Amino acid sequence: MFVSAQGSIRDVVFVDGVRTPFGKAKGVYAETRADDLVVRVIRELMRRNPALPPERVDEVAIAATTQIGDQGLTIGRVAGILAGLPESVPGYAIDRMCAGAVTAVTTTASAIAVGAYDIAIAGGVEHMGRHPMGEGVDPNPRFVSERLVDPSALVMGMTAENVHDRFPGITRARADAYAAASQAKAAKAYADGRIQPDLVPVTARHVDSGWELVTADEPPRPGTTVEGLAGLRTPFRPHGRVTAGNAAGINDGATGCVLAAADVADELGLTRKMSLVGFGFAGVAPEVMGVGPIPSTEKALARTGLSIDDIGLFELNEAFAVQVIAFLEHFGLADDDPRVNPYGGAIAYGHPLASSGVRLMTQLARQFEEHPEVRYGMTAMCVGFGMGATTIWENPHFGRTGEGA
Amino acid sequence: MSSATMTLEHPDEVVTQAHVRYAQLPGVSGPVALITLDNGQDHTRPSTFGPGGLRSLLTAVEEIEAHDPPVAAVAVTGKPFIFCAGADLSYRSSLTDPAEVRPKLTALGELGHTALRRVGEGRLGDRRVPTFALVNGAAMGGGLELALHCDYRAISAGAAPIALPEVFLGLVPAWGGTQLLPSLVGPENAVTIMIDNALSQNRTLRGPKAFALGLGDVLLDAADFLEEALHWVGQVLRGEVDPAKGRRPVERGAAWAAALERGRVLADARLHGAAPAAYRALELMALAETADADTGYAAETAALADLGSSEELVAGLYSFDLVNRRAKRPVGGPDRSLARAVTKVGVVGAGLMASQLGLLFAQRLEVPVVLTDLDQARLDAGVAHVHSEIDNLLLRGRISHDRANRLKASVTGSLTKDAFADADLIIEAVFEDMSVKKAVLAELESVVKPETLLLTNTSALSVTEMAADLTHPERVAGLHFFNPVAVLPLVEVVRTPRTDDAAIATTLQVAKQLKKNAVLVADAPAFVVNRLLTRFMGEVLAATETGTPIEQADGALDPLGLPMSPLVLLSLVGPPVALHVARTLHQAMPDRFRTPDGLARVVAAGKSSFYTAGPGGEQIVDPEVADLVRSMDDGTAPTAREGAAMTPEQVREAALSALAQEIRLLLDEGVVAEAADVDLCMILGAGWPFHLGGITPYLDRTGISERVTGRRFNPPGVATVA
């Protein structure tokens, strides 16, 4: 089909990934446009990778859940133009809610693999302050009349309570303990300087107080204790288990990465931080969307011929502590398994929906550097309306001796 | 220093706040204080410095000075698209008591120097920290001066406009600009920015050009300017980049003198010494070569007090307001919703004026434009002229190939007027003859829809009479352009007693789409600009006819600083056109508009100008023309009349008195609503200077209006100091 693939598929590498610091909705980015966040990410990717000629980029795929206003107008295309990419570089918008950026990566990677592209920029953005979840939605009345989904399916916090119901052994105490650990790991990762290298500073305007240089995530709450978490109210159900403390917040942010065919990366001298092994998406009942990553991971493992034991590092999106713990239980991993989210997760950093997938990949790439003894790593996340998304990556540093680990 | 203790009040000031935040840059010990200038409004209301804004800057530095940990540097930037647009001009306008102007402007000058130096000089307690201006957008006047006070400057490639427009308004850059600019960009570029650009219709710079002239140490893309500018600040503070290394050495001595001389020549050519600001700016720049900062800044403040209390400045601010406000919304226009859509335009005639109109309508209205002429060769030439102008735009890179194709395809020619059947607007630009024009309109009416707007570009004929025999005279109006059409921004929209509101609303809307400033005038002979210019020139011509040497008569108005002398203007307009207007006015008002006999002889002899090139290429009076104007039809020798030669003062007095009388009559006749409209017409249609306020403020302040007409045109203090 495509000459460049020569009748087979090509290896796809993760060249580099960056993101804006994440903000709290109505927080630091309250007066900053979503498209400007994406522009900043794209320009930083180009600046950090001077060996990549801009005209060689074949696609800009940017995910957003709410494709309205500054997240509308085919954001991949407009952001490319605003970022100063040549007009010959096309772009598009993509949506799979929380797994938007993951889908941007897997879709463009697939196109690279079959030889349609050599290089793509993939990422996502969500400005939940400007575009609250559910803005402008118009659910089909058949969902109700035919009872296609449980009414709780559209309220993510309620779906998390439903997961608690399904797995009574996952108590609020376990969820809170997990959440406190996530905050502690994130604080340590910051202190160790593991997060900052992949953040692109953003100047955020405040009409009443001037421009602010944002260099760090706004959501983390270092020093969070289980005792403190235990006192939080459960907004989704009286005497429930899900709180603002054991869930990701409502956030603003953008992410992006450069993907390339392995041979093209070599030709241009681009870095190779990870190699794509495979991926999987799967659907579950929307009212327990949190368990989505379990079947998507089973699928990805089955199709790549790997087992869970082959995976040495996990970057799991922490939409809710309960859904991560459900995943860990399913695969026989401990709540505090050191291979899981070594830098902490979305409970600390935040979860600007469609952008989060590439944050997981960027952090996994950093961990690969630190762990040449690990060959395979995984990202996984749950997705609204009952889905899961899993990607599996190989560590190019695997087997490297000398420094590291 | 009594003024330093004076607290300046300006209750109407939209205060630009100097917000402070602190940014930690990697590898820099101590935070960088980032000042944001923001008046809380969007970019359509740029941030400016009034007394409150300047005090806010001082407060900001006080806060920075007290900050713990101590800051490593101070940087200043603006709100989106705007760095700072300079001094709040409304402050000067708020000073209505002439006695308070000088002390308050002195205090404002000192406050400005104090505030801008406080930011730029980076003295915090006993420390000195580097200071940076991050010019993210428009930087005008005092805004640019603030940037000049800083040690280093980053400029956004998207920043515009960047300028020192003070001299254009009648001031000097008085918050450090005259002293700092030449030492940064060199005397030659300083003259370009401060004098040449200001006197060239206030030409401004965009980021890349400003950088090329040396105003910036680094030019950064607009897309993420502020982030990358702060990154650059970090590089400078870490010693990785030395911004001053890229600066060109500034030559003093001969280069300084040469630049000042160029500035003087420029100012003389445009002003003939008529307005003081440019000369004062050059004096200050001369001082800057050797003076220390305190001396230079004190001289700037003295200049601000002098110029700020001058008639020229008050007239300049009045003019600025006319051009920026009144010109945008014509006074007396009907409800804009009455305007009809214009989807096709017809132009009757294919001469030079018709071709210019065809091109303008095609470019701005982006609708089909059909030219007609009775003669195929003339028609072909007319269309070809438009097409070649479009090709020129393409060659100069002003338009794309696609746009050139579109424009060329939209301009066609037709020998018959059938092509106008579906036109919504037709403008005639045929020979200036009433019977010809009436015939054209009658023929048009037989072809077009009843509501098709019929416009005439006549410069002097009665639009009412032209439409008198039509079935639908209510759709006839005048739309009078000025030559060259592409350059002069004014159109006179002529309303007859029978023109209806829809026709006027449509004409005003079209004028706006054409990017012209419209002034609504009544149908009186030659409307405003040509009537006044003809009356004025009539006095100059009369002087030449009675024996005053042409150079002497023509130079008599030099002290006004008009863009060109009356007879050079007449030559540019074209003696035949001027003669036609003069004759029409003479017929209408023979008691004031003399018979243009001398001009008639010049035209009859086929002369296109009063001037010709001398042996050395210099401009000299054409001796043949000199003879023509003075020789009488009865053959009397010119020398016999030389006893009646007038002094320049007499010529000027006669011309200005005539002008005052004519303006009074024109206002009494209701040709325009107010004196301000007369001034707007003269500024935009004749290029008359801001320092005259158009003309009526000048006639008021010199006492001519009261002497000639018994009253002023404007109340004291509005367009004059008192």
Image (tube, rainbow, N blue to C red):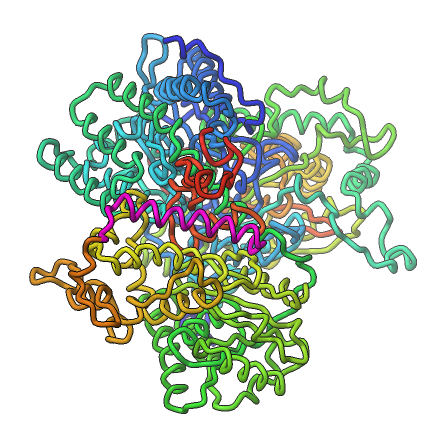
Q: Residue at x 81, y 48 (%)?
A: A153
Q: Nearer the viewer, residue B238 or A311?
A: B238
Q: Main secondary structure of the magenta part?
A: helix
Relative to B561, is B457 on the left or the right? right
Q: Position of residue A270 (x, y in %)?
A: 35, 52
Q: Specify whether A353 is left or right of B199.
A: right
Q: Residue at x 33, y 31 (%)?
A: B173
Image coordinates of residue B153 in percent, x first then y, are: 32, 33
* B491 and B705: which is toward the camera: B705
Bounds of the magenta span? B644-672
Residue A48 among those drawn in magenta: no
Q: Position of residue A255 (x, y in %)?
A: 53, 45
Residue B660 covered by magenta stretch: yes
Q: Above or below — where is B622 with respect to B224?
A: below
Percent across and percent down for residue A8 are 46, 70
User: The N terminus of chain B appears in which quarter of the rendering?
Assistant: top left
Whether residue A197 is visible here, answered yes or no, is no
Camera-nearest residue between B129 and B415: B415
* Residue A221 appears in the figure: yes
- In terms of depth relative to the viewer, which is nearer, B649 or B508? B649
Left or right of A257? Residue B450 is: right
Q: What is the total number of numbered labels drawn onto the structure image? A: 0
Image: A155 above or below B12? below
Q: Quadrant of residue B219?
A: top left
| Residue furthest right in the image | A145
